Image (tube, helix red, strand yellow):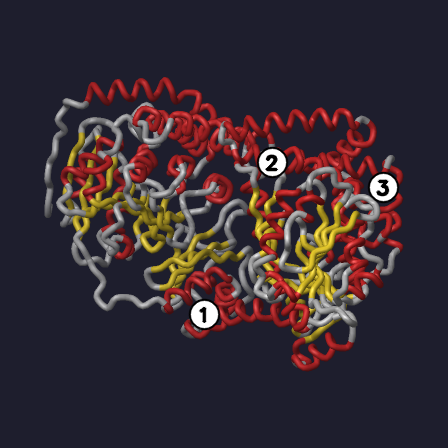
């Protein structure tokens, strides 16, 4: 402390006409754990016209409190005034709208003593009076900011110096010139740049916590953004090296958007102000309509426009901004150091201890494994940053090493098909194979296996992910290349390690399961499906084949070729009629469904049983992977449209707390080609809607409508990738186009069913249909298709347009067929 001062800290609080907030802040300082004799409080009144002075003089304070008028205007001048008369070696700057926790000053004091000469930044927990999406967005931003600063290897920069809650030595503050009083805001950032550049260290003290009663509103936020733009330009003028790292540099980018915004802000700022007013009105409309994504985008755009207006007001003309851009490269370029870990960690630490290291390239021999970029205003790299970076890398390496230990040795001989002709496929096709890491067995899934090749990696029953080969490995290198591809995939390694870490029950439950396959006049496809079903390694299951309105007895005759099958005929045309017939005929409590164009995995039912081991689970879906990728249409459906798979990680969907938007995205749960239900789910939610899906005018939507209705009635869902099937996608583009048209019709019909059933509010359905589906999934793809084909997007929209009439016709037909009794013929054991 200063000579003769009885205090350890001087608390400087600038204020301007916020008497009530200031008194709340001072009341919090009355109960500090340091005791009132450990600090003094200096309140600097910035051109006040309210009752602040009378309120301060009208109370007896337990600590020493002095107040002074600010020399100059603005918070920066007020803080400089307070710092100049402080009696202590260490100053705490505290805003008048931050209510300090009882341990606030003790935390600042302890951090300052532990890190002598440092700037200590405390945690200002946000509390916004403004509610709604604006308040939530700002709160989330601040929480995320402090969460990042708390990470062990965080590299502090000039933007982390925040004057609302910080402390530093008085001598350093005075010697460096204090805050720049010419700045309306971001004077703390500018001070932070000078402090870090002079070698002062920044420390984050989360226990130096205060509750920030932020009075921001959307309108004030835009004014703040304009002031930030003006301040950034002034900072760049003072410190040209910072210009490329400030947002105002974006205005000089060589893009159409930047040029247009620059033209508006510099030439016709009145138009920009009109746009901001219009944006404010639209933001209210979007929030009232619960359109969060458009609200979020417009909020970001309007703030960016306000910021650039501030830049333009400070720069006056675009030429001044370009001059700053041109001046930035002339500033001394920061150097980057090289560290080779092969030289040892002690050598690396010595290199960082020698002096200021602005940037760092970390290598293992010739391979660059990590990089920390050099940038002005960032603290020099030290061993703390190196340790945190290597810790993250080591965790990845450790996962790979652990996975490598779990793998058995690769076979000595390469697969026979590698030496066969035709192992290079046509340009637009890809081979599909399956690798089991338990024994390194590779099985071809497509008719012709070759390269390019996609390999589904599994370990016993559990699929782990895909690895890809664009070309054929060199002779004798197939197994090495495959092993390397597995071990360099972090997700696959993580799933493999997780399988071995989780204890499995010695005797897992194997409840009896009824398998229902609905088919119509696709005998050869069904034959392949049945062959896979009969190979399932599960002790107790039945297979029901539901023949839906057949035109010939071919399916019934096919079943005579195999034993252990049950045949049921449903004469009412429609996939959901057939599914409901299967439910009625099934003998067991768990009923699994697959389609006739799939091949189930041999562990399919084991995966289903493992998901249902939790008695609370009501229905499940599983992974669906492509059987063939040998045509451009199949590749498009899988890679561009998204296929049918929902990932390789199990997910639980509990309807409690789910928003209507999430309930309506039932297509994210899975598909009807791989689903299973407890019988109680149908008792609670009802059966499949016979007006939906293949065989009706709607052409789809029956599976996702069932998922949605089950969730909305309280059923618990699990997505289990261990229960997976192979699906044969449409081979040609004509067939795929028709499928997408049917998807549009089916999805729109599903939403109409939601309206009829009132599972969610009608307003929620309309918002979802317009924003989430029509706008995000269709119109955006028409505007910017990227990899999507516009004719396929149009095909889905055509289905949407046709849906209302089709839905009406399908409902009428379903009502007409309701009394009709279907014929059920059992053919067990024939």
Q: Residue at x 76, y 31 (%)?
A: 260
Q: Nearer the viewer, mark 2 or mark 1?
A: 2
The quadrant holding residue 403 is bottom left
Residue identifier under label 2: 297
Is 649 placed left or right of 619 in the picture? right
Q: Give the image location of residue 573, x and y in percent.
A: 23, 27
Residue drawn at point x = 56 percent, y = 59 percent: 31
Q: Specify which label sits upstream in the sequence, 3 or 1.
A: 3
Label 3–label 2 contact, CB within 8 A: no
- The residue pinned by badge 3 equals 321
Dot 2, how many residues are within 10 Å of its Cα: few (below 14), some (14-19), or many (20+)?
few
Q: Nearer the viewer, mark 3 or mark 1?
A: 3
- At mark 1, the secondary structure is helix
Quick check: 498 above or below 383? above
Q: Kindly tell me whether residue 578 is visible in this rendering.
A: yes
Is 395 in front, or is 428?
395
**Mark 3 closeness class: few <14, some 14–19, many ≥20 residues within 10 Å:** many
For the question of whether residue 161 can be seen, the reply is no
Q: In the image shown, does 312 or 504 lie closer to the viewer?
A: 312
**How would you rate the neighbour count of disc 1 (Cα within 10 Å): few for under 14, some for 14-19, many for 20 or more?**
many
Count numbered badges in the picture.
Answer: 3
Q: Which mark is residue 403?
A: 1
């Amino acid at each position: 402390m200063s000579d003769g001062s009885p205090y350890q800290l001087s608390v400087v609080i600038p204020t301007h006409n916020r008497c009530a907030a200031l008194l709340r802040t001072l009341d919090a300082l009355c109960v500090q754990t340091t005791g009132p004799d450990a600090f003094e409080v200096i309140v600097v009144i910035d051109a006040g016209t309210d009752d602040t002075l009378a309120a301060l003089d009208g109370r007896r304070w337990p600590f020493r409190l002095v107040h002074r008028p600010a020399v100059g205007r603005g918070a920066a001048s007020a803080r400089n005034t307070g710092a100049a008369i402080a009696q202590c070696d260490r100053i705490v700057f505290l805003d008048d709208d931050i209510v300090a926790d009882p341990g606030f000053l003790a935390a600042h004091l302890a951090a300052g003593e532990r890190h002598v000469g440092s700037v200590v930044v405390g945690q200002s927990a946000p509390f916004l009076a403004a509610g709604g999406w604006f308040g939530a967005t700002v709160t989330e931003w601040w929480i995320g900011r402090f969460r990042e600063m708390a990470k062990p290897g965080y590299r502090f920069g000039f933007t982390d110096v925040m004057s609302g809650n910080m402390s530093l030595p008085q001598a350093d503050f005075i010697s460096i010139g204090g805050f720049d009083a010419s700045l309306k805001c971001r004077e703390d950032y500018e001070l932070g740049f000078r402090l870090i550049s002079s070698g002062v260290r920044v420390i984050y003290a989360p226990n130096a916590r205060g509750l920030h009663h932020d009075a921001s509103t959307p309108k004030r936020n835009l004014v703040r953004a304009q002031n930030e733009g003006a301040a950034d330009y002034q900072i760049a003028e003072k410190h040209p090296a910072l210009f490329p790292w400030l947002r105002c540099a974006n205005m000089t980018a060589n893009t159409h958007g930047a040029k247009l915004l620059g033209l508006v802000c510099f030439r016709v700022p009145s138009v920009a102000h009109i746009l901001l007013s219009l944006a404010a009105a639209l933001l209210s409309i979007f929030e009232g309509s619960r359109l969060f994504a458009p609200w979020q985008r417009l909020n970001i755009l309007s703030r960016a426009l306000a910021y650039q207006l501030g830049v333009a007001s400070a720069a006056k003309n675009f030429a001044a901004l370009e001059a700053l851009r041109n001046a930035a490269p002339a500033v001394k370029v920061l150097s980057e150091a090289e560290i080779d870990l092969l030289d040892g960690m002690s050598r690396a630490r010595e290199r960082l201890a020698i002096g200021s290291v602005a940037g760092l390239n970390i290598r293992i021999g010739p391979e660059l494994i990590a990089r920390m970029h050099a940038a002005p205003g960032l603290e020099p790299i030290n061993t703390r940053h190196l340790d945190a970076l290597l810790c993250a890398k080591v965790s990845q390496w450790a996962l790979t090493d652990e996975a490598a230990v779990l793998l058995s040795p690769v076979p000595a001989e390469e697969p026979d098909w590698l030496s066969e002709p035709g192992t290079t496929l046509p340009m637009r096709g890809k081979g599909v194979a399956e690798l089991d890491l338990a024994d390194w067995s590779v099985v071809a899934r497509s008719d012709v296996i070759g390269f390019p090749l996609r390999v589904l990696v599994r370990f016993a029953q559990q699929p782990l992910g895909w690895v890809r080969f664009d070309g054929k490995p060199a002779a004798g290198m197939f197994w090495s290349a495959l092993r390397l591809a597995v071990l360099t995939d972090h997700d696959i390694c993580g799933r493999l390690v997780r399988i071995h870490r989780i204890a499995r029950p010695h005797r897992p439950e194997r409840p009896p399961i009824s398998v229902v396959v609905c088919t119509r006049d696709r005998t050869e496809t069904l034959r392949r499906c049945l062959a896979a079903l009969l190979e399932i390694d599960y002790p107790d299951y039945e297979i029901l084949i539901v023949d839906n309105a057949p035109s010939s007895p071919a399916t019934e005759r096919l079943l005579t070729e195999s034993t252990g099958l049950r045949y049921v005929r449903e004469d009412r045309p429609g996939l959901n009629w057939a599914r409901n017939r299967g439910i009625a005929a099934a003998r067991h409590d768990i009923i699994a469904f697959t389609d006739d164009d799939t091949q189930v995995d041999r562990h399919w039912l084991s995966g289903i049983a493992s998901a249902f081991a939790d008695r609370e689970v009501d229905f499940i879906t599983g992974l669906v992977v492509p059987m063939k990728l040998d045509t451009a249409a199949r590749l498009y459906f899988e890679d561009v449209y998204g296929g049918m798979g929902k990932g390789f990680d199990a997910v639980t969907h509990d309807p409690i707390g789910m928003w209507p938007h999430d309930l309506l995205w039932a297509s994210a749960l899975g598909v009807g080609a791989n689903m299973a239900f407890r019988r109680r789910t149908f008792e609670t939610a009802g059966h499949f809607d016979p007006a939906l899906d293949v065989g009706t005018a709607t052409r789809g939507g029956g599976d996702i409508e069932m998922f949605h209705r089950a969730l909305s009635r309280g059923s618990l869902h699990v997505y289990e990738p261990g229960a997976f099937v192979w699906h044969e996608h449409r081979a040609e583009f004509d067939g795929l186009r028709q499928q997408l048209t049917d998807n549009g019709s089916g999805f729109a019909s599903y939403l109409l069913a939601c309206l009829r059933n009132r599972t969610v509010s009608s307003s929620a359905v309309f918002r979802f249909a317009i924003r989430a589906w029509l706008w995000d999934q269709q119109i955006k793809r028409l505007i910017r298709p990227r990899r999507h084909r516009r004719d396929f997007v149009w095909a889905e929209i055509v289905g949407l347009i046709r849906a209302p009439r089709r839905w009406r016709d399908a409902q009428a037909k379903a009502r007409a067929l309701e009394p009709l009794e279907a014929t059920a013929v059992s053919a067990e054991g024939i």
